[in-house]
């Protein structure tokens, strides 16, 4: 394809080229909104139908880790925005620095997610044959939490069984959605990390400046979108019914 | 270039607003506001998401055509959520009880 510098033949100006790319990126993000929207819808309907089991499931998540991860992701959105700003103002070495910071914060997020998943594994909360919402109550150990936490958990489950005799199955549904939704979100983070690695490589070659920064801008849009998904996942999965604990 | 460059000052202000939102939503979740808990949680999330779209994602400074695409995404989402939830919430007189009872009677049937 005919190309003059960074300007491809089908465009007349770099402005027009960038506007087109941004528009295309947003069209892709619209499909992503609807993609995650389907999962949010599934979650909402089931949460409404099995609110007791979903409330108990939500209380079993680690609020501290969830909140810490929210802060980490918001910080990574700031460093991403700063990378875009550095590119549009031709501060080439700052672009690389901010991109690396963003990648590191993304790595911290995924690391915390691994710790959380491992915790759920230890608590027998992975959907499947060994899923047991009462496992920690039946087998109290320091891995499961403090005696006070387990006592309130036991009481919640006992109360819950009176309302919903199928509590275990419905709590399993909650955790299926928890792993499905956070897993898909984490997969997006992994893809984002791959894109960031490529951006860092290009940035080290000094490719991005005020004239041409479309890849930084558009991967930035993607990264912020993934942040927005987490902004909704966090309250929906971790926070509703939290006061009951 | 005609594009608008957002200053780092604005980004930091947005960051602080997002942090405050995160703190507020965690704090509100530990209080009992009855059915308002979910409204507060999703309200704060929507404010945070709007800030990210308008400033971090430059939605506020984008062309009208791009703005139309952004709004259309949420418009289609609203159709999907609104119509499906309208369907589910009118299938039974009391949807939450009925779905629960259905699953319970299925369990009894199989036991």
Image (tube, grey):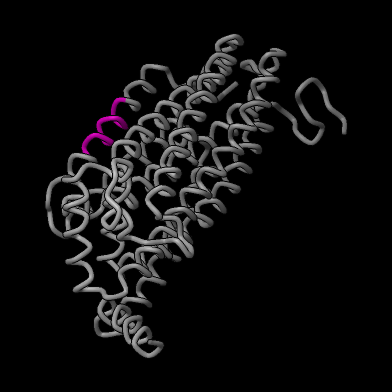
Q: Is residue B57 magenta?
A: no
Tell me which secondary structure the magenta stretch mostly adopts. helix
Segment tinted magenta in the rendering: B16-25
Q: Quadrant of the N terminus of chain A?
A: top right
Nearer to us in this view, A156 or A5: A156
Question: Between residues B34 and A4, which one lies in front from this camera angle?
Answer: B34
Left or right for A64, reference B59? left
Q: Which residue occupies the foreground of this view, A45 or A155?
A: A155
Q: Residue at x 20, y 58 (%)?
A: A154
Q: Position of residue B11 (x, y in %)?
A: 39, 23
Q: Indicate whether residue B20 is drawn in magenta.
A: yes
Up-down relation of residue A35 to residue B49 (above or below): below
Which of the 4 image quadrants contains residue A6? Answer: top right
- At a point 37% along the width and 90% down the height, the residue shown is B109
Q: Position of residue A16 (x, y in %)?
A: 67, 32
Residue B30: x and y in percent read 16, 45
- Residue extending farthest to the bottom is B109
**What residue is at 65 percent from the left and 29 percent from the top?**
A215
Image quadrant of residue A43? bottom left
- At horizontal 30% and vertical 25% (from top left) the residue drawn is B16
Label tally: 0
| x and y percentages locating residue A50 in the rendered image | 30, 69
**In the rendered image of this protein, does residue A48 appear above or below residue A66?**
below
Q: Going by the image, does A14 lie left or right of A58?
A: right
């Amino acid at each position: 394809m005919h190309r003059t510098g960074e300007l491809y033949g089908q465009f007349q100006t770099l402005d027009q080229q960038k506007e087109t790319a941004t528009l295309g990126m947003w069209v892709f993000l619209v499909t992503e909104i609807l993609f995650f929207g389907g999962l949010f819808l599934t979650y909402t309907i089931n949460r409404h139908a099995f609110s007791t089991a979903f409330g108990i499931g939500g209380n079993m998540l680690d609020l501290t880790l969830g909140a810490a991860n929210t802060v980490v992701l918001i910080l990574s959105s700031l460093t991403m925005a700063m990378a875009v700003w550095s590119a549009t103002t031709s501060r080439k070495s700052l672009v690389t620095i901010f991109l690396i910071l963003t990648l590191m914060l993304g790595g911290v997020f995924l690391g915390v997610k691994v710790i959380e998943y491992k915790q759920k594994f230890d608590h027998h909360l992975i959907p499947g044959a060994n899923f047991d919402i009462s496992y920690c109550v039946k087998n109290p150990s320091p891995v499961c939490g403090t005696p006070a936490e387990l006592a309130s958990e036991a009481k919640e489950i006992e109360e819950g069984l009176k309302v919903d005799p199928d509590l275990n199955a419905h709590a399993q549904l909650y955790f299926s959605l928890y792993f499905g939704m956070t897993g898909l979100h984490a997969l997006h983070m992994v893809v984002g990390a791959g894109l960031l690695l490529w951006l860092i490589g290009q940035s080290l070659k000094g490719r991005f400046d005020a004239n041409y920064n479309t890849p930084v801008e558009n991967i930035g849009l993607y990264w912020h979108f993934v942040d927005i998904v987490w902004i909704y996942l966090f309250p929906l999965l971790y926070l509703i019914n939290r006061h009951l604990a | 270039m005609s594009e608008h460059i957002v200053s780092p000052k604005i980004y930091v202000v947005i960051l602080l607003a997002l942090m405050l939102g995160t703190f507020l939503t965690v704090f509100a979740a530990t209080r009992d506001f009855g059915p308002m808990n979910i409204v507060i949680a999703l309200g704060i999330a929507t404010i945070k998401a709007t800030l990210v779209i308008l400033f971090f994602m430059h939605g506020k400074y984008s062309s009208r055509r791009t703005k139309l695409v952004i709004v259309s995404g949420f418009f289609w989402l609203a159709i999907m959520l609104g119509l499906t939830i309208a369907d589910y919430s009118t299938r039974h007189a009391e949807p939450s009880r009925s779905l629960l009872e259905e699953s319970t009677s299925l369990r009894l049937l199989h036991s």
